[in-house]
Structure formats: structure tokens, C-alpha cells
Image (cartoon, rainbow, N blue to C red):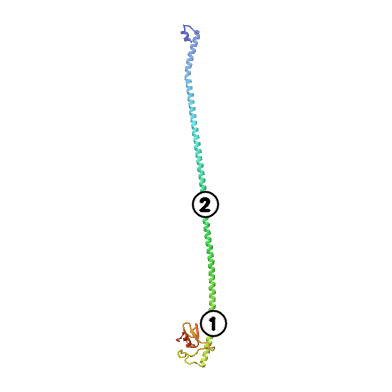
Amino acid sequence: MLILGFFIRGKKIFRPKLNLLILAGTFILFIAGGSMLPTVQTTAKQQSEVKSEEIQKKKEVEKQQAAQKKLKKEQAKVKKEQEKLKKEQAELAEKQAEQQQKAQAEEQKKEQEQLTKEKAVAEQKAKDLKIQQKQQAKLAEEKRAALIAEKEKEAEEAQKEKEKMQQQQEREKKEAESKQASPPANNGDSSNSGGNQYVDSSGQGTIKGSVNGIYHLPGGAYYNRTKKVVAWFKTPAEAEAAGYRASER
């Protein structure tokens, strides 16, 4: 305003004192504005930097949040995989336990079947042994009975033989007595005594026909020794006719 007053027709718009005050105030205001300009600029710069830092922090926070979210997703995925793995392990363990139980059941079944077979074999062996013992006892009883019967038969035959021997001795005694009374001629010669008869008191022939085809006359060396007599003859001719030959002694 002061400068304009100098140039506009030399007129003074304000009073000199007022002009000086205006000039001084303008100068002071100019100096104050100059001094305040860096502060404003610094404040704006600081605000810009703070805003930039806040944006950067926000970005970092968002980045961290995104990372945490991603980490949570990965953790959830890992947890899900762990649960799946745990479930698979549980299923596998359960399957293995079932297989083991099944194998044990099969093994027990086989052992039971083996025991049953062995028991059946043992029972069959016991039955066979019992039957064999019964058969052996029966055979032993039969042998014993047969032996007793044989002994009884032998005793009976011995008794019969004894009775026969006694009868023979009685006949021989009677024949000896009759021979002493009237002895026959040529008693021991079979060739010349074909008509002589050797009989006992009952008319029974006393010439022994043995099993080996030899006949023995009473008084001969083997007459009394001959036990197995199959035929009796009255005369040597009768014995020879039956196919027997005379004893040499």
C-alpha cells in the first residue's frame, strides 16, 4: 500500500506514521513467515513420513496377518493331515489287531483240531489195546483150556494105557501059566508056527501090530515096549496077511 502510494501521482494514501507502521509490520511479517516456512515444511514432511510409516506398518501388519492366516491354514492343513494319519494309523492298528486275533483264532482252532485228532487216536489205540488184551486173554484162556483138555486127554489115555497094560500083563500072566502047563512047539518061529494061535483066556489075539508095520509075538524083546498098537492078531500068518512083518527080536 505504501509503494502504491508513491507511484500513484505522488499521493500518499496513508499517513507517514501509519505507512511506517505498515512497512514495519510487513517487514516483521515477512521475517516471521520466512522463519515459519521451514517449520511448516518440516511438519508436513514429518506428517508425510508418519503417514508413510503408518502405511508401511499397516502393510506389515496386513502382511503379518496374511502370513498368520496362511500359517493358520497350513497348521490346519497339517492338523488335518495329522488327524488323517492318526486315523489311518488307528485303522491300521485295528486291522492288524483283527488279523492277529484271526490268526490266533485259526491257530487255536488248528491246535484244538490237532488235540481232538490226537485224543481220537489215543482213544482208538486204547480201544485197540483193550480189544487186543481181551483177545490175548481169550487166547490164553483157550490155550489154558486146550492145555487142560490135552492134559486130561493124556491122563485119560495114560489111564487107558495103564488099564490096557494091566490087562496085557494079566493075559501074559495067564499065557505064561498056560504055557507052563502045555507049552506050544516052536513058539518063537514064525515060519513053522503059522497055525499056532496066541490068544488070551477070552479068545482075544495077543500078537501086537505096531504103527511101523511090525508085529510082535508075546515073549519077544520089543513086545512089552510096544505101546502104539494098531491091531491085534491071533496068528503070525494073520499078521503077515495084513501086511505086517515079524520082529527081528
Disc 1 and disc 2 in contact, CB within 8 angstroms: no
248 relative to 135 in the view: left or right = left
Mark 2 falls on what kind of element? helix
Label 2 crowd (10 A; few <14 / some 14-19 / many >=20): few
Nearer to me, 51 or 127 = 127
The quadrant where residue 149 appears: bottom right
Q: Residue at x 52, y 52 (%)?
A: 102
Identify whether 4 is placed above or below 104: above
Name the amino acid type tagged 2.
Lys
Q: Quadrant of the C terminus?
A: bottom left
Q: Residue at x 54, y 82 (%)?
A: 160
Residue 173, horizontal then vertical, whole percent: 52, 89
Q: Which residue is mark 2?
A: 102
Label 1 crowd (10 A; few <14 / some 14-19 / many >=20): few
Tell me the distance, in whole angstroms, between the alpha carbons under discs 1 and 2: 84 Å
Q: Please, which residue is most extreme toward the front here?
A: 241
Residue 191, horizontal then vertical, whole percent: 45, 89
The mark found on residue 221 in the picture is none
Q: Which residue is mark 1?
A: 160
Residue 194, horizontal then vertical, whole percent: 47, 90
Report the label total. 2
Identify whether 152 is placed above or below 198: above
Nearer to me, 45 or 192 = 192
The earlier-in-sequence mark between 1 and 2 is 2
Residue 209, horizontal then vertical, whole percent: 48, 84
Name the amino acid type tagged 1.
Lys
Mark 1 falls on what kind of element? helix
